[in-house]
């Protein structure tokens, strides 16, 4: 056993005359090591924990990765910041395509479920109906750094040498329970790295990126993603969703009152009286939708949040950003013609996309919970991961899962 010292909160690792190299006990030492390796553990987890047990949310088929990147051209990059015992935050960037987004803008829309939040750039998206930068998610006080980084990224791209105005789009949730948010640890370089390393394919979920320090339904929240692909008879289009979950309510899965059964729901105890938080939802589709119908699609995504039991409390900033990657609908920054002939799908044809957005949002939120790990951080606060096996047992109890899976 290592010697104790009055200056140590644990056991001294090494005692030298006049100097003490110590740490706060082996438990904290090992905890910090595990936190440093957390992104590796998360990325190595099997995907779709609920699906692997037999629960299929909704009726539509998923895309190949069951992720927002199933929508052709969409890229996702993430930076996770785990430092010391108080920094638990990060950045998640979603790119509509890998080219110069400012020069080739995409149709977009924003839906505000509850406006207690900071979605920078939203008014211009609503006014002009397009998106000209990556969508970046981070923590509340990281928004200024993220804005500067997105502006830097755009100005530095070839072809943008004369650009003098950039509408950077940055969303946030408040991770101040687990993260030293006042330290403003997200830097421009972190955001640039997330953008520059964005890729297609699988997307890490849970306690990563902008979801590193978030909470949801009284459990550890995080980043989640899912997708739905329509049959050819309905257009064959794909809808992908990525969420940053940090909100409250009474969790339900496929109609099963999980929060009630676990006695873990908002207003059920003093611990859970604070239901305020936020949820950022990014919806991508390859369907040729204009801004008006993308706005309608975004509204349906919010219905997916409601299906999980979210209540959009007074202090919750709940936003949906929806965009189309259809190449024929890209909007050139400088266009010579006064008119731009474009073809969109009809209003009657968007209903299947609405259902796809609802299902994908619901599953993305559940994935954010089931892929998250228990995290301890700022002021020794801890947020536990959802008790997976207890939830599986409850789903069996309500006949949502076959016995033995």
Image: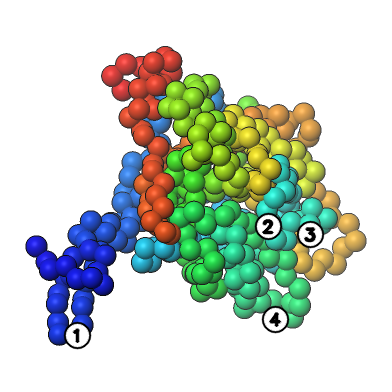
Using the rendered image of the protein, determine whether residue 75 is visible from the camera's viewpoint. Answer: no
Q: Residue at x 47, y 59 (%)?
A: 179
Secondary structure of the residue carrying numbered label 1: loop
Q: Nearer the viewer, mark 1 or mark 2?
A: 1
Between marks 4 and 1, how big is the CA–CA gap? Answer: 58 Å
Instruction: Identify the disc placed on residue 118.
Output: 2
Q: Which residue is mark 1?
A: 18
- The mark lying in front, picked from 2 and 3, is 2
Is the residue marked by circle 3 packed among few (<14), some (14-19), or many (20+) residues within 10 Å? some
Residue at (51% x, 38% y) in the render: 270
| Image coordinates for residue 309, horizontal then vertical, percent | 57, 31
Looking at the image, do the residues carrying marks 1 and 2 touch, with CB atoms under 8 Å apart? no
Q: Could you tell me how far apart the alpha carbons at marks 2 and 3 are, in whole angstroms?
A: 14 Å
User: What is the CA distance from the residue labelled 3 to the residue labelled 4?
Assistant: 22 Å
Residue occupied by mark 4: 161
Query: Where is the N terminus found, in terms of image quarters?
Result: bottom left
Along the polypeptide, which appears first: circle 3 or circle 4?
3
Residue 171 location, quadrant:
bottom right
Sequence order check: which comes first, mark 2 or mark 3?
A: 2
Label 2 close to label 4 by CB (< 8 Å): no
**Residue placed under numbered mark 3 in the picture:** 124
Q: Is residue 274 left or right of residue 221?
A: right
Report the residue at 32% width, 58% height from top.
35
Q: Position of residue 291 (x, y in %)?
A: 77, 47
Q: Where residue 267 appears, x then y in whole percent?
A: 56, 33
Q: Residues within 10 Å of mark 4 (few under 14, many from 20)?
A: few
Q: CA distance from mark 1 to mark 2?
A: 49 Å
Nearest the viewer among 195 and 251 is: 251
The mark that comes first in sequence, 1 or 2, is 1
Mark 2 falls on what kind of element?
loop
Of the two numbered discs 2 and 4 on the same chain, state the one appearing first in sequence.
Answer: 2
């Amino acid at each position: 056993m290592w010697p104790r010292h009055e200056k140590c909160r644990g056991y001294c690792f090494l005692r030298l005359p006049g100097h003490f190299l110590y740490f706060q006990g082996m438990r904290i030492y090992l905890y910090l090591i595990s936190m440093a390796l957390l992104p590796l553990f998360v990325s190595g987890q099997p995907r779709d924990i609920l699906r692997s047990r037999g629960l299929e949310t909704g009726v539509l088929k998923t895309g190949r990765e069951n992720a927002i990147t199933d929508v052709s051209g969409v890229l996702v990059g993430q930076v996770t910041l785990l430092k010391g015992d108080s920094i638990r935050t990060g950045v998640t960037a979603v790119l509509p395509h890998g080219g110069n987004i400012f020069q080739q803008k995409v149709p977009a829309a924003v839906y505000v479920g509850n406006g207690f939040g900071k979605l920078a750039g939203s008014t211009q998206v609503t006014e002009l109906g397009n998106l000209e930068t990556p969508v970046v998610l981070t923590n509340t006080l990281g928004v200024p750094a993220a804005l500067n980084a997105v502006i830097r990224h755009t100005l530095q791209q070839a072809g943008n040498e004369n650009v003098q105005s950039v509408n950077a789009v940055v969303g946030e949730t408040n991770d101040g329970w687990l993260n030293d948010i006042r330290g403003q640890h997200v830097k421009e370089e972190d955001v640039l790295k997330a953008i520059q390393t964005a890729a297609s394919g699988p997307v890490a979920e849970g306690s990563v990126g902008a979801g590193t320090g978030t909470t949801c339904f009284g459990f550890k929240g995080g980043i989640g993603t899912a997708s739905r692909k329509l049959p050819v008879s309905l257009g064959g289009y794909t809808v992908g969703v990525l969420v940053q979950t940090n909100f409250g309510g009474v969790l339900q899965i496929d109609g099963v009152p999980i929060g009630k059964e676990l006695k873990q729901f908002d207003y059920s105890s003093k611990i859970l009286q604070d239901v305020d938080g936020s949820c950022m939802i990014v919806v991508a589709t390859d369907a040729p939708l204009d801004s008006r119908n993308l706005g309608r699609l975004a509204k349906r995504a919010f219905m997916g949040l409601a299906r999980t039991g979210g209540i959009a409390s007074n202090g919750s900033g709940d936003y949906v950003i929806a965009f189309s990657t259809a190449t024929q609908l890209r909007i050139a920054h400088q266009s010579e013609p006064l008119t731009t002939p474009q073809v969109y799908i009809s209003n009657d044809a968007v209903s299947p996309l609405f259902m796809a957005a609802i299902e994908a949002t619901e599953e993305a939120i559940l994935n954010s919970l089931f892929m998250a790990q228990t995290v301890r951080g700022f002021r020794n606060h801890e947020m536990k991961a959802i008790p997976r096996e207890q939830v599986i047992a409850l789903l069996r109890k309500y006949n949502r899962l076959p016995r033995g899976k």
